Image (spheres, rainbow, N blue to C red):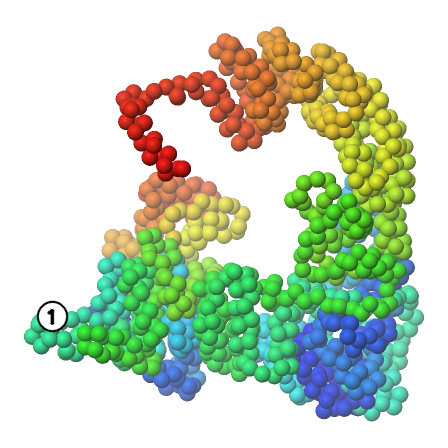
Amino acid sequence: MTDTLRQHAEQEFGAELEALKEVDDRARPTNWALSPWAVVTYLLGGKLDSGFTVTPKYIGDRRLMEIAVATLTTDRALLLYGVPGTAKSWVSEHLAAAVCGDSTLVIQGTAGTSEEAIRYGWNYAQLLAKGPSRDALVESPMMHAMENGKITRIEELTRIPSDVQDTLITVLSEKHLPVPELNSEVAANKGFNVIATANNRDRGVNELSSALQRRFNTVILPTPATLKDEVNIVEKRVNDLGRSLELPVPPNTVKEIERVVTIFRELRQGTTMDNQEKLKSPSGTLSTAEAISVMNSGLSLATHFGEGELSADELAASLLGAVVKDPVQDPVVWREYLETVVKERADWKDLYRACREMS
Amino acid sequence: MLQDKVLYLGIRHHGPGSAASVSRALETYRPDKVLVEGPVEAESLLKMVGNVGLKPPVAQLIYAPDDHRDSVFFPFAEFSPEWQAILTAQRDGLPLEFFDLPQTHSIALARRAREEMEARWRAEAERDTAVDDEEDSRDEDREAPPQEQESDSEEELLDSLKLDFDPLDLLAEVAGYDDGESWWEQMVEEHQQDEKVFAAIADAMTAVRDQVENQRRLSERERLREAWMRKRVRQAKSDGFERIAVICGAWHVPALLRKVPVKDDNALLKGLPKVKVKATWIPWTYSRISRRSGYGAGVAAPGWYDFLWRHWQQGAGSLASGWLTLAARTLRREGIDVAPASVIEAVRLADSLAILRERPQPGLRDMQEAIRTTYGMGEETLLALLEATLLVGERLGEVPEDMPKTPLQEDFEACCKRLRLKREAVEKIVDLDLRKDSGRERSALFHRLDILDIPWAKATYSSGKGTFKESWQLKWDPALELKLIEHSIWGTTVAMAAGAFALSQLRETERVALLTEWLDRLLLADLRDAAQEAIKVLKAQAALASHVSELMQALPGLVQIIRYGDVRNTHSATLERLLDGFMVRINAGLTTQCQQLDEEAAREMADTMTGADSALRLLDNNQHIDDWQAVLQRMAELDTLPGVIVGRCYRLLENANVVDSGAVSTALSQALSKAMDPQQTAAWLEGLLAGSGLMLLHDDGLWEVLDEYLCQLHPERFEELTPLLRRTFATFAFGERRGLLRKADADGPAAAAQEDEPGFDHERAAKVLPLLDQILG
């Protein structure tokens, strides 16, 4: 085990990818490491004919993953869209790892992302010394992926300024990246494609132009369909992260996960699980990812400052932080929820008390 | 499945794959006799098949002429396997027989069950002393279709016409599919296969039926039907046919293959009841073949099946590109831009999905997902838009004109032909000019149908001015044909049926207002005889009416009829005499009836008075108006009447300029004086103003009275009165209250707003005026 805090997907799940490669006898698109079937199996998990068990990376609708993988075999790029914390980046990383064995060709979209980050930059020392030449060119991940027939990932596409976004149009439609300074171009090899992620809850984003939109197939990743699914996701991620952060996971964690996820789902949907009561929803998104982080900080508190047992007191602090995002409206929503729902549940007394003390 | 000279072809009703496979199987098997699931009574309709006028989707309608509640439909689309079998048999000159249990028995059985059930309700109702409950339950039960009542309450019996589960689900589960529908679709409907598929279907279905029949019994109807089918197969064999093809629902095949002793079947089929039935073709629609319409053997997407079938007939091009192009074109018609490049990408995506899912070609779900991903940016909304137009489809079938029809239908069609009206499933607006004969006749026809509760045409808002114009929105639904047949008991022509039906309805009512409404409808429908009859009934009821409010409620309707009667050449003299009678009785009885009314009833009475007042003003008969206003004036001076009525009297009188605003002002300040009971005061104000913010807004006289009064109030009195006023003002619409606020502002201190702002330089401002003048022209 290395000391790296977080390994890339292709390293962490290298054994699974190898095992899949061994049994995979289906047709592979040129330059793909696995067949589309094997990629879907890698994402959703399953037992292989060789007896090897692949862990699920995405818990949810199989058909969505099939659409995503099928898109990568076509001419269009893939846009994973959805509210924050619906595993967009996670899916994108694992897709890239499974398709081309390399999930590291990432362009992080920010308001400051420039054209150079998508096309190429210059090594100015070289440029001054030798003039424009291929040696003076600094490749972007995009260029690298094109030359090697791999997948580039663009995170948070809609945060990139519109004029920079449009640089992608040439790449995606022509599959060539012109380098006018050298009077040449870089042609994409087969296997090249782009996976972009974007979330639809962000403010201050730059909507895609329709020209660019037409170059993407959009797959909307939904929030988990059922309580069971969501508890599974949180549990799995909490265990994984617990391992890498060296946090022991106490046995009562599953029960606490269920409570946290229930609270998140109820507030998100605006009704109680039994559909009997209407609730106000807070301003935050209350994504699955946030539920995971609530659990993690709870575990961390329990390990380092508590008695090793995860109790309501540890969770209350981070729950409050996750729910109350707007200092004016959200405390009201939270207090109402505490008094009308949490208080009424017989086995939630400890949580109610802990939350009351916090707020 | 070939067994003992008989080839069993188990199909899914309305499955194009089944249809193609049936055609192919018949082609290779070359039968000398074809047995098709269906009632023998429909055989007389077969000669119509092949007639160019008969275009599917159509349905066989089998009904009992003596009671139209007993009727059954058997829909056929072009892609229905039965339809293809009929066409093949006709082309090759094969003897074809419908071998299901005859409807003469089925309908008789259903009727018997219904009658038994009704007898049971009656018995229960008699036992039940609570009258209310009885009414409720009987109403509910009457609406339930007769088949529902057959089932045994202790046990859910198996019956293919109303299975509560999909037998295919059990098979699909084994094959690893989510549901039976998509499994069958993939295995059978989306491919054309040879007859081997039928052996596989029979085997699979045998396994399913063995399992479910172990747990539950078959219903009586199901046992009878299958026994009858076996009997007909035996008969065909003994008639000497050597190569018999049997086409029936896959569900029945195992039962037909089963070895059942002849005498058992015969014993079961002995002594079946009989009724007389008739059969005819009626046009049908795809939306009524879809499962959402509640049709038991319905399919999810008739539009898709239609497309599949046509695609195979033409036998060219890829399925995905055809369907996805069609979807793109449909969306463009809806105003959604789908680029041709997107269509290409969608086809590629669908193909890739099919490869990934290891299928020979993309299925409907793959393509729907491609549409969502490429056309719809991942959103579901586009698919919902395509649902009605593309997936279900709007195709309307046609039947030739020379169909066996009920006399009423024939008359209706004659009317449509004469008036040049076409029955179409698409909505269409028709404008009528009532000054012309054709316009009047069409309008009358629509009104007659409306009386018969056949909502083909709906009256809509007409944009033109004048009462001689009418707008109707036309939309034909083939189910209306059934209603026409249902109504045959009322008469042999549309006019007769509508008249008789209306009279039967209005004789049951005692409310005068409702009677005038019926009278109006009869006159609009140009049913003179029935209208005469209705006037008699109305007169009789009016004489019996114990409350004048009933007559007053009927007044607006009656005035409407008299006032606009001349457009339709109605002789209104009779009605005017009727109205005279009404007025005499109203004027005589109103004061007395207003005496002892509680708050709620008084409020209602005040509104009734307003309605009657405006009706009289519309009538414009001075004699009536004078008499009426005299009554109102007398009432306005009576202290014993409820406040709301007195207030209303003043309002009506003031509106008609019978009293001046000074009198109203005096009355108002009296009503608002301290000696009065606050309840009475509030009611008085309510009577004067309720719901009429606009009146206060536009009628400066009334406004001044109130304004003047309120302005001179002492502050404490004002505070006391505020809640009372508020109660009335709260009934005004929001916009009216805003308007009143503005009016109050403008009248009073509003003048202050026009005062000069300090430091405003008029000379400088004036300098820009010429320029502004130039800009604004």
Determine whether, in the image, residue A296 is placed left or right of residue B435: left
The amino acid type, in three-letter code, at marker 1 is Tyr
Indicate the quadrant where residue A310 lies: bottom left
Q: Residue at x 87, y 47 (%)?
A: B499
Residue B490 to residue B20: above or below: above
Determine whether, in the image, residue B693 is placed left or right of residue B610: left
Q: Is residue B180 visible?
A: no
Towards the viewer: B486 or B636: B636
Residue A289 to residue A41: above or below: above
Q: Crowding near pointer 1: few (<14 within 10 Å), some, many (20+)?
A: some
Q: Residue furthest top?
A: B675
Which quadrant holds the C terminus of chain A?
A: top left
Indicate the quadrant where residue B254 lies: bottom right
Q: Residue at x 55, y 76 (%)?
A: B322
Q: Residue at x 59, y 22 (%)?
A: B699
Q: Position of residue B261 (x, y in %)?
A: 85, 82
Towards the viewer: A222 or B156: A222
* Residue carrying label 1: A124
Q: Position of residue B753 (x, y in %)?
A: 39, 21
Determine whether, in the image, residue A89 is placed left or right of residue B298: left
